[in-house]
C-alpha cells in the first residue's frame, strides 16, 4: 500500500504478534504489552520537532563527533603529504581519500548511525531498530549472533574503534613523512580500518534485513502458540475450571505437528500454571483490635 509499511515491520512494532480482543483477562505470568508513550509533559519537545520539521532537536548520532573529527583531519593530511611528496599518486592518500577509502567508509558509517537515530529517512531506521529489538526478544537464544542488537546498533556504539583511529591517524601520517613507515604500510593500516568500519555498516544493515525477512515466520510460531492458550473459566463462587477451546483453537491443534504442539503446550502451561494461595484472613486484616 502506498505510504504504508510492510507486514514484517508492522509485526515487529506490535512485538511480533497480532492483537485480539478477549472476553476475559487472566494475567498470571503471561506477557503484557505497554504503550511506548512519553506522556503529556513533552509539549515543548513536540513544538521543537514540529517547528524544525525533523528530529535534530531531540535525537543525535553519538558517533557523529568522532567521525567528524577523523574526517576533519583529511584536509590537513592531504596538504602535509602533498608538501612532503609532491602532487603525484600516494598510497596512503589514496587509502584515505580515494574512492572506497576511509573517508567514504566513515561517511557511510555516519549515514547508518543517522538512520538508526531517526535523523534521516523519516525516522524509519529508528523504528526498524525498535522493531528488531522486539524480534530479538521473541527469538531469544535462537537469534543468531549476526542478527544481535549489538550488531544492529554498532554504528551508534563504536567509540573505542573510532577513538583509536582518530588518535592513531596523525601518528601514522607523521611516521610516513618522517620516513619511519612506508606509505604502503600506512595504506595497509588505513585499508584495515576502512574494512572494519565498512563491515560494521554492512553487518548492521544485514541484520535488519534478515530480521525483516524472518519476522513473519517467527511471528507465526509465536502467534500459533499464543492462540492455543485456552483461558480458564470461573464459576459464580470464583472457583477456577478448565476453559473450553474455541473452534479456531481446535483447528489450530490439528495444524501444528504433535511434537511442536507439545512444546507450545508446555511453554503455555509454564506461563499460566495456577498457584493456590493460603486463605486470607480478611476479618483479621480489617480488625481495629489489637
Image (cartoon, helix red, strand yellow):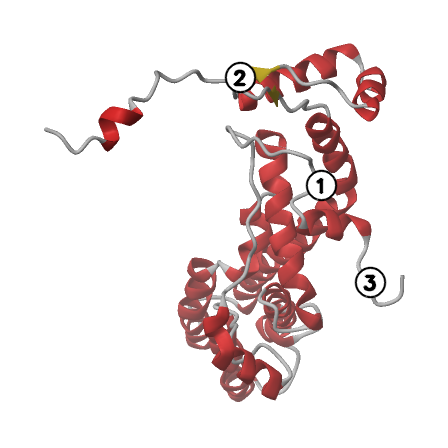
Q: Which of marks 3 and 1 is in front?
A: 1
For the point 62% across and 30% down, which residue is it?
Answer: 142
- In the picture, the quarter occupied by the C terminus is top left
- Residue density around tag 1, few if under 14, some if 14–19, many if 20 or more, within 10 Å: few
Q: Nearer the viewer, residue 23 or 176?
A: 23
Q: Can residue 10 be seen in this view?
A: yes
Quadrant for residue 269, please give it.
Answer: top right
Q: Mark 3 points at which residue?
A: 4
Q: Are marks 3 and 2 in contact (CB under 8 Å)?
A: no
Q: Position of residue 75 (x, y in %)?
A: 54, 86
Determine the CA span between mark 3 and mark 2.
Answer: 47 Å
Q: Do the residues labelled 1 and 2 touch (CB within 8 Å)?
A: no
Q: Taking 39 as reference, is 224 above or below it? A: above
Above or below: residue 215 compared with residue 263: below
Left or right of residue 68, residue 204 in this image: right
Q: Nearer the viewer, residue 41 or 117?
A: 41
Counting the numbered discs, the total is 3
Residue at 72% from the left image edge and 23% from the top image edge = 228
Check contact, mark 3 vs mark 1: CB within 8 A: no
The residue to which callout 2 is attached is: 239
- Relative image position of residue 227 (x, y in whole percent): 73, 28
Disc ID at residue 21: 1
| Residue shown at 49% from the left, 58% from the top | 157
Where is residue 22, by image quadrant? top right
Give neighbour class at mark 3: few <14, some 14-19, many 20+ (Cα, 10 Å): few
Of residues 115 and 17, the one nearer the viewer is 17
Left or right for 254, reference 127: right
Q: In which quarter of the image is the N terminus?
A: bottom right
Q: Residue furthest left?
A: 290
Amino acid at each position: 500500500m502506498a505510504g504504508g509499511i510492510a507486514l514484517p515491520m508492522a509485526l515487529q512494532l506490535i512485538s511480533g504478534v497480532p492483537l485480539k480482543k478477549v472476553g476475559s483477562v487472566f494475567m498470571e505470568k503471561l506477557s503484557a504489552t505497554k504503550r511506548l508513550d512519553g506522556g503529556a509533559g513533552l509539549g515543548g519537545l513536540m513544538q521543537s520537532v514540529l517547528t524544525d520539521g525533523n528530529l535534530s532537536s531531540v535525537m543525535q548520532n553519538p558517533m557523529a563527533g568522532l567521525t567528524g573529527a577523523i574526517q576533519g583531519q583529511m584536509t590537513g593530511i592531504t596538504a602535509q603529504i602533498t608538501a612532503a611528496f609532491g602532487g603525484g599518486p600516494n598510497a596512503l592518500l589514496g587509502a584515505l581519500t580515494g574512492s572506497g577509502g576511509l573517508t567514504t567508509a566513515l561517511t557511510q558509517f555516519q549515514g547508518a548511525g543517522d538512520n538508526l537515530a531517526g535523523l534521516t529517512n523519516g525516522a524509519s531506521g529508528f523504528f526498524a531498530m525498535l522493531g528488531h529489538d522486539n524480534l530479538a526478544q521473541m527469538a531469544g537464544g535462537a537469534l543468531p549472533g549476526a542478527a544481535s542488537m549489538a550488531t544492529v546498533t554498532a554504528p551508534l556504539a563504536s567509540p573505542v574503534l573510532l577513538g583509536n583511529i582518530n588518535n592513531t591517524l596523525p601518528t601514522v601520517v607523521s611516521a610516513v613523512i618522517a620516513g619511519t613507515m612506508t606509505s604502503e604500510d600506512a595504506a595497509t593500516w588505513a585499508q584495515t580500518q576502512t574494512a572494519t568500519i565498512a563491515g560494521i555498516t554492512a553487518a548492521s544493515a544485514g541484520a535488519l534485513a534478515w530480521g525483516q525477512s524472518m519476522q513473519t515466520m517467527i511471528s507465526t510460531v509465536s502467534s500459533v502458540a499464543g492462540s492455543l492458550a485456552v483461558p480458564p473459566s470461573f464459576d459464580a463462587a470464583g472457583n477456577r475450571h478448565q476453559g473450553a477451546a474455541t473452534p479456531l483453537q481446535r483447528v489450530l491443534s490439528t495444524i501444528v505437528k504433535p511434537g511442536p504442539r507439545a512444546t507450545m503446550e508446555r511453554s503455555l502451561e509454564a506461563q499460566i500454571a495456577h498457584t493456590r494461595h493460603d486463605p486470607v484472613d480478611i476479618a483479621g486484616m480489617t480488625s481495629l483490635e489489637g
